[in-house]
Image: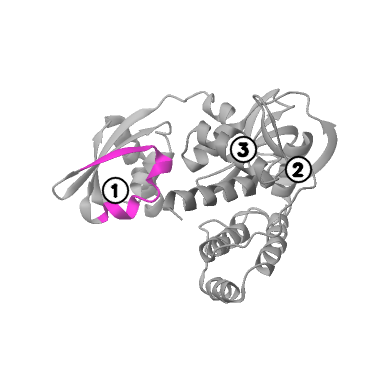
Amino acid sequence: MGLDTINRFDRIVAILIQLQSKRIVKAQELADRFDVSLRTIYRDIRSLEASGVPISSEAGVGYSIMEGYRLPPVMFTREEAGSFVAAEKLMEKFTDTSLGSHHKSAMFKVKSVLRGKEKDWISTLEAQVLIDPSHTPFDENIPNALEILFESIADKKQVFLKYHSLNSEKPSDRFIEPVGLFHENNFWYVLGYCHVRNDYRQFRTDRMLRISRSDEPFTLEHGLLDEHLNKQPEREKTKIIISVDKSIARYISIGRKQYGFVSEEIKEDKVLMTFMTSDMENGFPRWYVMFGDYAEIIEPKSLKARVIEILKEAQNRLAN
């Protein structure tokens, strides 16, 4: 049996698994995943149909498997099983308590179909992998926030929030229609249509004081999350160039992305870093102060002035 035949067999099996994982699967989705042409996908689908798999198709929609058709449980490779350990640890630390417990229950089912050696392998990994997030969990008061938001998005039902925004002294009551969730800079955000503001807003989950389900249906068709995020109005940004001592440049590389990092250029014992930021008042200047004794501001002058203001204020407070 040639290598091409083996690769095609593996791909056809993987296509069958993917068809069982969703109600509708588009041919382009399969072609993108396996990096093959649409013609190849059409041929593989015909092979599955010829082997007796009941596949229905509709032009412009996609493929689906007849309801009730299922293969016996699929065996996981050791590497696939190992990836579950990382997923489980991340679920424990970066989602709410409710979703974490559901994932733990699902993991027991996954482990139940593993072979003996793979089970031992997984047990060894689980005991030796730890994840320590930089932020405290957001779900101390709302342990089921993400679960409720997931349900709301899928069922198209509004949710009630008691929300304390950064710019407000008191919490406010909101009814929102969640469009989608995303994780950015160590925080979970939900983008939703707010009935108080009559507009789309982003809500950070750690600022939610309470969340509850409602029976009120969505009043609008919201489209995809990516579409909303891509059309968010861009705030005016300022170009910043700083020169950082090469010896410490690597220590600030982890967090620089959230401050608008664009590029870097090594100049002997210095690293020139370029940023585009929309927060010249607090965000970037206060971050710069953390390592300012090892760096120089090349441009703009306004950043130098703001950093000096911050340092003078700190000096005055220390003198008192």
The spot of residue 134 in percent (x, y) is 50, 57
The amino acid sitting under disc 2 is Glu
Whether residues under marks 3 and 1 lie with C-beta atoms below 8 angstroms apart, the answer is: no
Q: Is residue 172 in view?
A: no
CA gap, disc 1 to disc 2?
A: 46 Å
CA gap, disc 3 to disc 1?
A: 64 Å
Residue at the spot of label 3: 46
Magenta stretch encompasses residue 154: no
CA gap, disc 3 to disc 2?
A: 36 Å
* Element assignment for label 3: helix
Q: Is tag 3's residue or tag 2's residue first in the polypeptide sequence?
A: 3
Rendering quarter of residue 30: top right
Rendering quarter of residue 167: top right
Q: Which residues are magenta?
A: 248-265
**Residue 151: which numbered mark, if any?**
2
Q: Is tag 1's residue or tag 2's residue first in the polypeptide sequence?
A: 2
Q: Is residue 96 in view?
A: yes
Residue at the spot of label 1: 292
Nearer the observer, 272 or 115? 115
